[in-house]
Image (cartoon, rainbow, N blue to C red):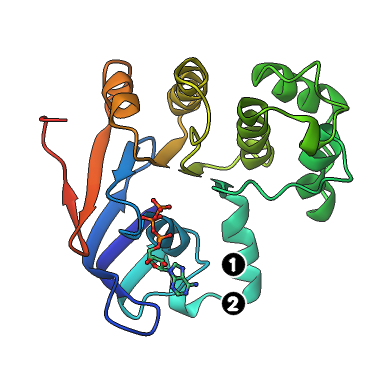
Amino acid sequence: MIEFEDVTYGYGGAPLLADVSLRLAPGSFHFLTGPSGAGKTTLLKLCYGELIASQGRVTLFGQDARTMTRDDVAMMRRRIGVVHQDQQFLDHLSVVENLSLPLTVSGRTTPQGDLEELIRWVGLENQAQAHPPELSGGERQRAALARAIVMSPEVILADEPTGNVDWEMSLRLLKLMVELNKMGKTIMIATHDLNLIRSAKQQVQARVLRISNHRLQLAGADL
Ligand SMILES: Nc1ncnc2c1ncn2[C@@H]1O[C@H](COP(=O)(O)OP(=O)(O)OP(=O)(O)O)[C@@H](O)[C@H]1O
């Protein structure tokens, strides 16, 4: 689904990521970890075509990211749901309106019941009409997850989805991710939280990738 072959990327200066090879197989569950500034967000952006590799090849659903047209990128983005670190909601719209937006923009009609079910699934049924500034950190994160999956993507990439929430809420978000994986979704979560990774490994078969000194390594069982 998503494959990197010897990918190098830098923001102008020295490479931030060097010779990265990676394969996200359908239905797999990956964590991406590494120190702050190591390049986790950058790697996720390469995964959804927001950035293009300086060297090497990124293949997204069988297509070389460099050769994608704008239409190809638009189609590909529907297959990848992204939970952004900074969430990016429209504050003047309610939660339900924010969630409807990707559907409206893409011209899709989804039965109202499906949207309500999604909102219930993330436990926001009492906040559906609230506006994003009125939500707690954990509610915002669950709204961000709901928005990432509203288009039924095959892959979900989540950038620090448990940042700024307590442990109980982290576990709740993790449970939602595990359920999505059990439904067949391919998941990659960037996180600093090693306790979250340990907890996940008791629930699901997850691979842990670590960015260290610009390289991507498979972490051992010593987490
Ligand atoms: N648009 C940009 N232009 C220049 N440098 C950038 C840009 N975006 C990120 N960087 C730099 O690239 C490095 C890696 O950033 P990135 O956000 O990918 O790291 P991260 O591992 O996700 O960090 P964190 O865990 O703190 O979120 C940082 O030094 C950052 O300042």
Quickly name the residue at label 2: 69
Farthest bottom residue in view: 12
Q: Identify whether 119 is placed above or below 18.
A: above
Alpha-carbon neighbours of circle 1 within 10 Å: few (<14), some, or many (≥20)?
some
**Quarter assignment of residue 189:** top left
Residue at horizontal 24%, vertical 39%? 208
Asked whether residue 61 appears in the rendered view, the answer is no
Disc 1 + disc 2, Cβ < 8 Å: yes
Alpha-carbon neighbours of circle 2 within 10 Å: few (<14), some, or many (≥20)?
few
Q: Quadrant of ligand 1?
A: bottom left
Q: Identify whether 98 is placed above or below 171.
A: below
How far across and down, in percent of the image, does residue 206 sit? 28, 31
Q: Name the element at disc 1.
A: helix
Residue at horizontal 64%, vertical 74%? 70
Classify residue 37 as left or right of residue 176.
left
Classify residue 15 as left or right of residue 49.
left
Classify residue 43 as left or right of residue 132.
left
Quickly name the residue at label 1: 73
Q: Name the element at disc 2.
A: loop
How far across and down, in percent of the image, does residue 211 sit? 24, 54
Identify the image quadrant of the C terminus. Answer: top left
Q: Identify whether 217 is placed above or below 166.
A: below
